[in-house]
Amino acid sequence: MEMKAKILGIKSVDYVSKKTGQPVQGAELHFVRELSSREVENSVGQAVGTVFVSVKSPLIERISPAIIGKECELVYDFDGRFSSLSDIVLPAKA
């Protein structure tokens, strides 16, 4: 599943999970996107969202202040119950 989004901001994440006791490190991407056809039935405007990218993910290398304000494709894998971010496709450099 692909979703077009505009990156609005990045938040660094670094804490110890109270639930697992394990460190959680990475970045949250904050974005805005168009409403889906299902959302348009009861919403107006745009939708905002956040996605976490772990430092363990190779995608972390694509996250920098340079992507703020850029349109991109967020690509998710879906196994029937859960979805996970599998790629961030940034626009080609001009």
Image (cartoon, rainbow, N blue to C red):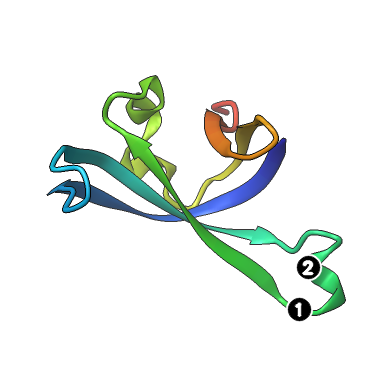
Residue denoted by label 2:
39
Residue 65 in the image, given as x and y percentages of width and height: 32, 44
Residue 50, relative to residue 81: is it above or below? below
**Quadrant of the image for the C terminus?**
top right
**Quadrant of the image for the N terminus?**
top right
Residue 30 in the image, given as x and y percentages of width and height: 44, 56
The label on residue 14 is none
* Callout 2 amino acid: Glu
Quick one: 89 or 25, which is closer to the camera? 25
Asked if labels 1 and 2 touch by Cβ distance under 8 angstroms, the answer is yes
Residue 36 in the image, given as x and y percentages of width and height: 79, 59
Q: CA distance from mark 2 to mark 1?
A: 6 Å
Question: Of all residues shown, which one is farthest toward the front?
Answer: 19
The label on residue 43 is 1
Residue drawn at the location 70% of the way across and 35% of the way down: 80
* Callout 1 amino acid: Ser
Residue drawn at the location 32% of the way across and 38% of the way down: 64
Callout 1: helix, strand or loop? loop
Mark 1: few/some/many CA within 10 Å (<14, 14-19, 20+): few
Mark 2: few/some/many CA within 10 Å (<14, 14-19, 20+): few
Viewed as shown, does residue 1 lie left or right of 10?
right
Residue drawn at the location 39% of the way across and 29% of the way down: 62
Q: Quadrant of residue 34?
A: bottom right
Viewed as shown, does residue 10 lie left or right of 34?
left
Residue 35, relative to residue 63: is it above or below? below
Callout 2: helix, strand or loop? helix
